[in-house]
Amino acid sequence: MTLVVRRSRIIAGLNAGMALAVALGAAWYLGANFADAEAPWAGAAVGAALIGYQVWQNLRHMTDPTPVVAIGADGLALPQNADAPIPWSAITRVGAARGFAMIGGGRLDLGLSPEVFFQVRLGKRMMGDPVVKMAGLPYGISILAQGLDHRATTMLAAIETHWPPPA
């Protein structure tokens, strides 16, 4: 059986709603204070643009059906980050870390063989990408479960049914 993990539509919708509220507040501030030369309108404009990007990104996440992770007998598939599933024999380490209370989901840490590691396209934490370089392990990746529809512990349990591969 394959475990398919996607972005949570509920969390993406909540994030988009909060970002939209902040963007509307920034737009109101700009409209109310545009004529005032003393008001920091340039900073508010940059902030509004950044929050507008956050709204767009979360709406895109909410409507994107592409899986982030698929865990099955053939390996660990990262459709947005790797062209082929990572075979179980290329995974050298598996672990999960708990997230913060109320915002978590945790983090799944994987050690990979160097050949496979360099084939994975890693994202940026700052941009909200769930598959990133793992801190402290030269050939490690982390799957950040915050904002996904399954927790790291659920993904770990699915991986442990296939890993370590029989020798």
Image (spheres, helix red, strand yellow):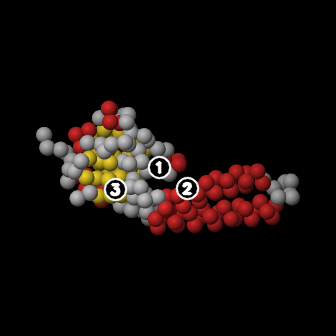
Q: Residue at x 32, y 48 (%)?
A: 77
Q: Which residue is mark 3?
A: 152
**So how many labels did they put on this image?**
3
Using the numbered discs, state the Cα–Cα distance from disc 3 to disc 2 in whole angstroms: 23 Å
- Point out which mark residue 57 bears: 2
Looking at the rendering, in which quadrant would you find the N terminus?
A: bottom left
Q: Amino acid at mark 1?
A: Asp
Mark 1 or 3 closer to N-term?
1
Q: Looking at the picture, how far across and down is residue 159, in whole percent?
A: 25, 52
Q: Is residue 105 visible?
A: no
Q: Is residue 70 visible?
A: yes
Q: Residue at x 47, y 49 (%)?
A: 129
Crowding at label 2, few (<14), some or many (≥20) Cα neighbours within 10 Å? some
Tag 3's secondary structure?
A: helix
Q: Residue at x 52, y 66 (%)?
A: 13
- Point out which mark residue 129 bears: 1
Looking at the rendering, in which quadrant would you find the C terminus?
A: top left
Up-down: is 25 above or below 53? below
**Which one is in front in this view, the residue at disc 3 or the one at disc 2?**
2
Q: Looking at the picture, how far across and down is residue 40, in whole percent?
A: 78, 53
Closer to us: 133 or 89 = 89
Q: Amino acid at mark 3?
A: Ala
Q: In the drawing, does residue 89 fall left or right of residue 65? A: left
Mark 2 or 1 closer to N-term?
2
